[in-house]
Image (spheres, rainbow, N blue to C red):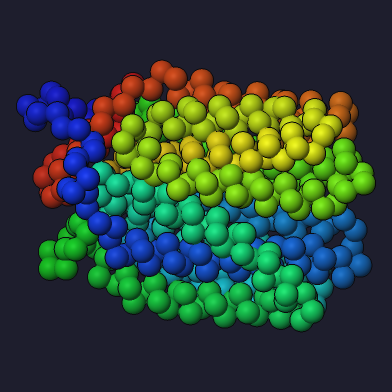
Amino acid sequence: MPINASTSGRPEQPLTPEPEQRPSVPREIRVLVAAAFVVALGFGLIAPILPQFATSFNVGVAAASVIVSIFALARLVFAPVSGKLTDRLGEPTVYVTGVLIVAASTILCGFAQSYTQLLIFRGLGGLGSTMFTVSAMALIARISPPQIRGRIAGLYSGSFLLGNVAGPVLGSFAAGMGFRIPFFIYGGALIVAAAIVYFSLSRTRRTLTPGSTTKVLAVERISLSEAWSFSTFKAALVSGFTNGWMAFGVRMSLIPLFAVAAFSSNGTVLAGLALAIFAVGNGLALTVAGRITDTFGRRVPILWGLSIASLATATIGWVDNVPLFIALSVLGGIGTGLMGPAQQAAIADVVGQGRNGGKVLATFQMATDFGSIIGPVIAGFIADQAGFGWAFTVSGALGLLGVLAWLPVKEKRKVENAAGPGAQTPPSTTAGTED
């Protein structure tokens, strides 16, 4: 059981210092933020094309949907391996390898001559995706200054959001190129991004803290059993699962179908508009979510954000007028954007600065991916049996379980020792209450 700072004789310090004392965002993290934008941009570029490309091999809608699901399934299955690789090889190596695997699989998708080939190549991309996702989160947790973890999580989430919004726009312009060319463009961009990240992160492979270029030692690892001792980690797994169910699963699969069914005259337009408006609300929240997280702690923005997102999800399936539908879409985006940086910062608190948390980050990623996979399946079944209203209500009620998981969490927010693991400062100084 880790020792709290209060019991070790160290005076308690507030997490947030005066504004002029805030450290700057490390250069390595700025590189990861830029790379995240490229990844999300390319994903948005091929996402609308992929199902259509699958149907070009004379398969039905169900088979085309499997092409989309195989990516998430591969991420879920390979996440534990990604965590172990990150612990053993280091974050930069696993990150670059994962990006290159996604690049190779994307280019191979462009060359696919059958549905089976497309399915295999797309699944390979999910394998690489979980490698760079887990390693990036682990590296950010290791080198992020504790005082600005919320801001850094907001920057990283915002780069993905911006890429996901801009990608489909570029995809509409690339539609005239056919199904294959966008895959080649995305794959080539990923190779360039991997090269930039490789050279930019070369000095961080085994350094203890940001800016340490001379003192190189093996990075201390946090075990999964240690992470389980923190109530914040267990609460984050629950909220990650429910957020994956609502935001990444049900929103992407059922909102477009509901819009078409509920607003037949202009449902097709509203289907795309709802997703875009959700992204707008998400972006608005991200502009302030990081600062709120660093100022008030992780628990407050997660409770508010998840509550807002859950209530918006629970009620949107019952609306029958366009203004309310749009308003609830915006609220859902605001809620998700408000909780996202706080949730990532909470996991980073558990890992602690200067430590490798591959297995911990992989477990959190698995919880989110699992929710995004089974959410659409169960909610879709409910929609078929009882209607869209109950499907969204059940999903929103599930989101409130995440709220309940965070209610008993009591944060102990103190600044970690900037000297890293060599100073023997336990991660419990920011991770919360032990069980």
Residue 307 at x, y percent in the picture:
56, 27
Figure check: 168 above or below 173: above
Quadrant occupied by the C terminus: top left
Q: Residue furthest top?
A: 408
Task: Count up the numbered dots.
Answer: 0
Q: Residue furthest left?
A: 9
Residue 325 quadrant: top right
Quadrant occupied by the N terminus: top left
- Compared across the picture, whether 154 is left or right of 331 comes to left
Q: Write the residue at 56% across / 39% down.
A: 334
Q: Write the residue at 47% across / 74% down.
A: 193
Figure check: 375 above or below 127: above
Residue 66 quadrant: bottom right
Q: Nearer the viewer, residue 29 or 223?
A: 29
Q: Nearer the viewer, residue 30 or 334?
A: 334
Is residue 222 among the parts visible in the rendering?
no
Residue 400 at x, y percent in the picture:
58, 24
- Compared across the picture, whether 204 is left or right of 80 comes to left
Residue 381 at x, y percent in the picture:
82, 34
Residue 62 at x, y percent in the picture:
85, 53
Q: Residue furthest front?
A: 323
Figure check: 321 above or below 166: above
Q: Write the residue at 64% across / 41% down.
A: 330
Is residue 24 among the parts visible in the rendering?
yes
Q: Write the residue at 14% across / 24% down.
A: 6
Residue 109 quadrant: bottom right
- Compared across the picture, whether 407 is left or right of 117 comes to left
- Compared across the picture, whether 331 is left or right of 288 comes to right
